[in-house]
Image (spheres, rainbow, N blue to C red):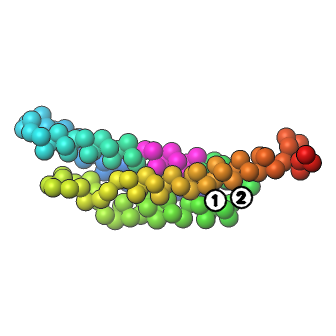
Amino acid sequence: MILIFPIAVLWAIPISRAVSFLGYTKSILNEEQTLNAQNDVRYGIALLILYLICLVADLVLCLLFARKYFGLLLLLLSVPIWVVLQVIRIRPEEVTVLVPSINLLPILILNLIPLFVGLGLVAVCKLKFNSLGNTRTN
C-alpha cells in the first residue's frame, strides 16, 4: 500500500502532460481542420488512454502484492517504474510531424507483463492452498 502514492505521482506527470497536449491539439483542430491536426488529436487520446491503463495496471499490482509479498512487488514494479521514467524523460507528448517520437505498444506491453505474471502467481497460490490456508491434499 505504501507504493501506491509514488506510483500515482510518477504517472501523474505524463498524464497531466497528455491532458494539456490533448487540449492544445483540440484547439489547433478547431482552428485548422486539417488531417494532421486530427491525427494529433487521435495520438493525444491514445496517449491518455495508454497512460491511464498503465496507471491502473500498476495500482492493481500494488494492491495484489502489498501485504504478503513486498519483495516480489518491488521486483515486478521495477519494469513499470523504468517505463514511466523513460516516458517522463522522452516526453512523447508533442505534435507528430511524420511519425510519433515513441511507439506506444512497448509501453503497454512492458506494463501489462508484470501484471499478468503477478496474476499468475496469485492464481498458483490460490490453487496451492485451500480457503483455510492449509495445503491441499488432493
In this orientation, does residue 83 appear? yes
Instruction: Mark 1: give few (<14), some (14-19) or many (20+) Cα within 10 Å.
Output: many
Amino acid type assigned to the residue bearing label 2 in the image: Tyr
- Is 30 displayed left or right of 70 in the figure? left
Could you tell me which secondary element the residue under label 2 belongs to?
loop
Residue 134 at what x, y percent from top left?
Answer: 90, 48
Residue furthest right as drawn:
137
Image point 9% across, 39% down: which residue? 34
Report the number of numbered marks: 2
Q: CA distance from mark 1 to mark 2?
A: 6 Å
Give the magenta range. Answer: 52-60
Q: Is the Cβ of the residue at disc 1 closer than 8 Å to that at disc 2?
A: yes
- Name the dominant secondary structure of the magenta segment: helix
Residue 78 at what x, y percent from top left?
Answer: 54, 65
Residue 77 at what x, y percent from top left?
Answer: 56, 60
- Is 129 displayed left or right of 33 in the figure? right
Could you tell me which secondary element the residue under label 1 belongs to?
helix
Residue receiving disc 1:
73
Q: Nearer the viewer, residue 7 or 110?
A: 110
Which label was assigned to residue 69? 2
Amino acid type assigned to the residue bearing label 1 in the image: Leu
In this orientation, does residue 28 appear? no
Instruction: Mark 2: give few (<14), some (14-19) or many (20+) Cα within 10 Å.
Output: few
